[in-house]
Image (cartoon, rainbow, N blue to C red):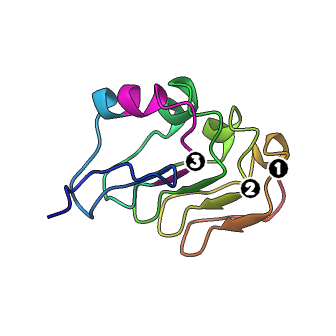
Amino acid sequence: STPENSLPENNTFTTTPRVGIDEELLKTLGKLSSLEHVELNVEGIEDASAIAQFGMTSLRSLSLNVNKISPDLRSFSGLSQLALLSLSDNRITSLDGIEDLVSLEQLNIESNRLHSLSP
């Protein structure tokens, strides 16, 4: 049987829906400097700044769909390697901070509360 939260050899971390996430889990993930892919598609995350704060700077893809993240993309500014960011079904109202995501190739912001597509 596969544990609900696991880190396979492909440098990916995924949680099952509605498991939740706390600061301790983020601290643990932050110690995994080779972590490249994170999926935290769990309702309830409001502040994503801890992802960069706890050292997950090697992330290439991050999926935080179906959460409560708001108001913009500034909390991801420390993730300079991030190529894919998926934030569908959140509370994003602005693209402020997108200019800091220098490696970003794909952005999914479907079903948010955007007022404008300008940063």
The crowd level at tag 1 (other Cα within 10 Å; few <14, some 14-19, many 20+) is: some
Secondary element type, mark 3 = loop
Pointers 2 and 3 in contact (C-beta within 8 Å):
no
Residue 103's label in the rendered image is 1
Q: Is residue 12 above or below residue 78?
A: below
The first of marks 2 and 3 along the sequence is: 3
Q: Is residue 22 left or right of residue 117?
A: left
Which residue occupies the foreground of this view, 1 or 54?
1
Between circles 2 and 3, the one closer to the viewer is: 2
Which quadrant would the N terminus be assigned to in this image? bottom left
Q: Residue at x 21, y 54 (%)?
A: 19
Residue 116's label in the rendered image is none
The location of residue 114, given as percent across then percent down, is 65, 65
Q: Residue furthest left?
A: 1
Q: Is residue 38 left or right of residue 93?
A: left
Which residue occupies the foreground of this view, 77 or 28?
28
Residue marked by disc 2: 83
Q: Which residue range is magenta in the image?
A: 26-38
Pointers 2 and 1 in contact (C-beta within 8 Å):
yes
The first of marks 3 and 1 along the sequence is: 3
Residue 78: quarter of image: top right
The crowd level at tag 2 (other Cα within 10 Å; few <14, some 14-19, many 20+) is: some
Residue marked by disc 3: 71
Between marks 2 and 1, how big is the CA–CA gap?
Answer: 5 Å
